[in-house]
């Protein structure tokens, strides 16, 4: 499960503490992750990603791209940070 482009935070070793560098890296990762989570939440408002798509499967790409365009319009064409 997962892929090469996935990153996970460093876990605290048993009976030890994380270094300051590891804590800082975890904070940077969490700030990127929360941005993505907010975008996913906005897409789910349109219920395209949270429910079964009941139209013809060839129209799914058109619909999802339209929804993503509306989401970008809703967030005022916010420029995505370098992920």
Image: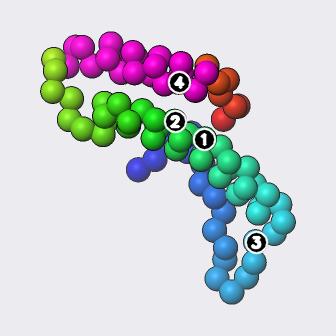
On the image, the x and y values in percent for residue 47 come to 31, 34
Magenta stretch contains residue 65:
yes
Q: In the rendered structure, are the residues bearing label 4 and label 1 in contact, judged by CB atoms less than 8 Å apart?
A: no
Residue 40, above or below 22: above
The disc label shown at residue 35, or none: 1
Vertically, is 1 above or below 79?
below
Determine the main secondary structure of the stretch shown in magenta.
helix
Tag 4: Cα neighbours inside 10 Å, few (<14), some, or many (≥20)?
Answer: few
Residue in front for this viewpoint, 3 or 65? 65
Q: Earlier in the sequence, mark 2 or mark 4?
A: 2
Query: Is residue 6 in sight in this rendering?
Result: yes
Verify CB contact (< 8 Å) between mark 1 and mark 2.
Answer: yes
Point out the tag, 4 or 1, that comes first from the N-terminus: 1
**Which quarter of the image is occupied by the C terminus?**
top right
What is the quadrant of residue 21 in the picture?
A: bottom right
Horizontal side of 35 relative to 43 (left or right) equals right
Circles 2, 4 touching at the beta carbon (< 8 Å): no
Mark 4 lies on residue: 74
Residue at 42 percent of width and 32 percent of height? 43
Q: What residue did someone put label 3 on?
A: 18
Helix, strand or loop at disc 2? Answer: helix
Q: Which residues are magenta?
A: 57-76
- SS for dot 3: loop
Where in the figure is residue 42, as x and y percent of width and height? 46, 35
- Residue at disc 4, secondary structure: helix
Disc 2 vs disc 4: which is toward the camera? 4
- Residue at the spot x=67%, y=23% of the render? 79
Report whether 40 appears left or right of 59.
Answer: right
């Amino acid at each position: 499960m997962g892929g090469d482009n996935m990153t996970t935070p460093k876990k605290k070793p048993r009976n030890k503490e994380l270094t300051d560098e590891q804590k800082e890296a975890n904070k940077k990762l969490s700030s990127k992750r929360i941005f993505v989570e907010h975008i996913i939440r906005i897409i789910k408002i349109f219920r395209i990603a949270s429910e079964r798509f009941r139209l013809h499967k060839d129209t799914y790409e058109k619909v999802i791209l339209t929804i993503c365009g509306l989401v970008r319009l809703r967030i005022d064409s916010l420029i995505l940070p370098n992920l």
